[in-house]
């Protein structure tokens, strides 16, 4: 009976370790892709930005990165599964909703928004295209909510990592700082400080890489 119990524990540990490793690798890959894509991302506040040559490739790259990050988010909370708290559960819910909605945003940016300026009589900044109709105005509201959920989810995840004793606290602080910086620049400015947006994009991608590598290498106890 004892041997059977030990076999079950070892099997569960190996399965959890595999899941962490997959999530970790996904975060490493998504962090690298996101850091590069955000560095070349055309500003949404420049007229005609959706028609720029770099618009489609950067957003296709972000689509891959954000899709992988959904698996990465699941891997993070598989890593924290022994620390079941109300806060961690709330963070996971916000994180998963935000990660899934981030994929939705990029799908719209890749396949829907570039067609709008082509049919317009004049080019305008992407964030002003909501003036073209009520549906696009509602889409802008969804963009704001989705980005807010995405940022809040990763900030809460960073706090959960800081409170955990499994990883160095600086990884969580790194993630929190990058999200706050991106949030301020994305939601509360009108395209100023574009260089800072690139810097925080690189920092954010690096935080995913550090987090993914850490949970990938962490050896689960029996």
Image: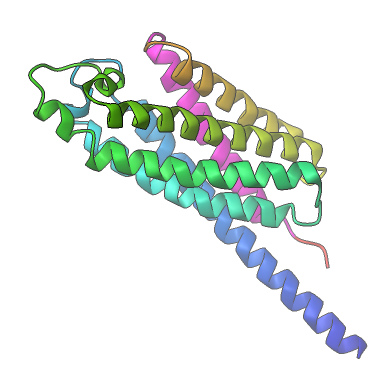
Left or right: 164 with respect to 199? right
Quadrant in the picture for the N terminus? bottom right
Image quadrant of residue 103? top left
Where 21 sits versus 33, above or below? below
The kind of secondary structure the magenta stretch mainly shows is helix
Left or right: 54 with respect to 171? left
- Magenta segment boundaries in residue numbering: 192-219
Quadrant in the picture for the C terminus? bottom right
Name the foreground residue: 62 vs 134: 134
Q: Is residue 68 magenta?
A: no
Left or right: 166 with respect to 182? right
* Image location (x, y in percent) of residue 217: 66, 54
Name the foreground residue: 30 vs 187: 187
Where 76 sits versus 113, above or below? below
Image quadrant of residue 144? top left
* Image location (x, y in percent) of residue 148: 53, 29
Where 44 sits versus 57, above or below? above
Would you say residue 168 is visible in this rendering? no
Tell me the residue at 79%/45% (across/down). 86
Left or right: 135 with respect to 124? right
Name the foreground residue: 197 vs 167: 197
Q: Is residue 218 magenta?
A: yes
* Image location (x, y in percent) of residue 147: 48, 31
């Amino acid at each position: 009976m004892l041997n059977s119990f030990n076999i079950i524990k070892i099997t569960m540990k190996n399965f959890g370790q595999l899941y962490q490793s997959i999530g970790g690798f996904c975060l490493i890959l998504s962090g690298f892709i996101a850091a590069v894509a955000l560095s070349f991302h055309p500003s949404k506040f420049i007229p005609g930005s959706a028609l720029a040559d770099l618009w489609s490739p950067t957003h296709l790259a972000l689509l891959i990165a954000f899709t992988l990050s959904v698996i990465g988010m699941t891997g993070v909370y598989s890593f924290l599964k022994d620390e079941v708290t109300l806060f961690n559960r709330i963070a996971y819910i916000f994180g998963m909703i935000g990660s899934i909605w981030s994929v939705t945003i990029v799908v719209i940016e890749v396949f829907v928004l570039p067609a709008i300026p082509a049919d317009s009589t004049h080019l305008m900044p992407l964030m002003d295209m909501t003036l073209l109709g009520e549906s696009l105005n509602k889409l802008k509201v969804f963009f704001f909510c989705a980005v807010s959920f995405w940022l809040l989810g990763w900030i809460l995840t960073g706090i959960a990592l800081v409170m955990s004793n499994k990883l160095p606290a600086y990884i969580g602080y790194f993630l929190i700082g990058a999200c706050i910086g991106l949030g301020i620049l994305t939601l509360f400015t009108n395209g100023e400080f574009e260089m800072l947006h690139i810097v925080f994009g690189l920092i954010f991608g690096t935080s995913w890489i550090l987090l993914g590598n850490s949970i990938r290498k962490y050896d689960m106890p029996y």
